[in-house]
Image: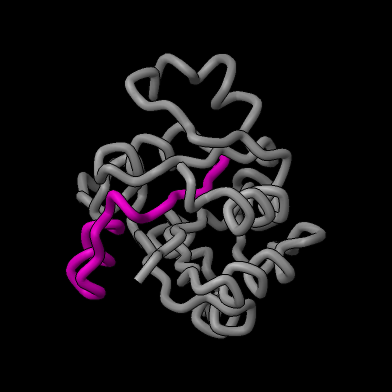
């Protein structure tokens, strides 16, 4: 299985940080990116920090319905807050480790697409190929936050998720 792990807030849509998950609106091109990845034989999976759950601000939001509806093959959610000390909140690689164990993945064949340094570090720690998008906090990841993930290099920097999917479906196999 060729998995592509995609961050939600700031990568797929919405603001870089949302207080309530029902405020999320996908960016233009996001549904098409998921269709394209699925059609090309990739397994798009979502991995996302959602501290709104720990803070009681999720309002019973149905993440599964959202993710299933957009075409995600699976999803992994960290429900913890920043200070909870879990191993699943990015930049920790716990969400990716869960996916690896569940699906028997060779992580060196997987991609991470995200807008934050924490997405890049989580993916880098697991040996994934990294694609940074410039939506959300992507400019910060390349600028003021670059030192936080300087030991890792993206294989591609895209303006948005649709462009990342275009590149991956066209050139990803040669990377």
Span colored in magenta: 95-115
Residue 148 among magenta residues:
no
Determine the image quadrant of residue 124.
Answer: top left
Q: Left or right of 115: which side holds 85?
A: left
Q: Left or right of 110: which side holds 97?
A: left
- Residue 55: give x, y in percent of width and height: 43, 58
Residue 111 visible, this orientation: yes
- Residue 62: give x, y in percent of width and height: 54, 81
Depicted 61 relative to depicted 150: above or below: below
By what rule are the colours in the image chosen?
A: one colour
Residue 104 among magenta residues:
yes
- Residue 155: give x, y in percent of width and height: 49, 35
Query: Residue lying farthest front?
Result: 174
Q: In this view of the protein, which residue sits in the foreground, 41 or 128? A: 41
At horizontal 35% and vertical 35% (from top left) the residue drawn is 121
In the rendered view of the protein, which quadrant contains the N terminus? bottom left
Q: In this view of the protein, which residue sits in the foreground, 175 or 60? A: 175
At horizontal 28% and vertical 49% (from top left) the residue drawn is 108
Query: Residue lying farthest right?
Result: 28
Residue 61 visible, this orientation: no
- Residue 149: give x, y in percent of width and height: 39, 24
């Amino acid at each position: 299985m060729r998995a592509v792990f995609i961050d939600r807030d700031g990568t797929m849509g919405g603001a870089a940080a949302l207080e309530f998950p029902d405020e999320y609106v996908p960016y233009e091109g996001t549904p098409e990116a998921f269709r394209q990845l699925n059609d090309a034989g990739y397994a798009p999976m979502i991995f996302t920090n959602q501290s709104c759950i720990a803070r009681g601000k999720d309002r019973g939001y149905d993440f599964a319905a959202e993710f299933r509806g957009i075409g995600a093959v699976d999803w992994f959610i960290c429900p913890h807050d920043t200070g909870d000390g879990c191993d699943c909140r990015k930049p920790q690689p716990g969400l990716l480790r869960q996916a690896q164990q569940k699906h028997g993945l060779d992580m060196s064949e997987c991609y991470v697409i995200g807008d934050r340094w924490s997405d890049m570090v989580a993916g880098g720690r697991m040996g994934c190929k990294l694609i940074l998008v410039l939506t959300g906090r992507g400019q910060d990841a390349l600028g003021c936050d670059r030192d936080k993930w300087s030991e890792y290099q993206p294989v591609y920097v895209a303006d948005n998720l649709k462009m990342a999917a275009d590149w991956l479906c066209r050139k990803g196999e040669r990377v």
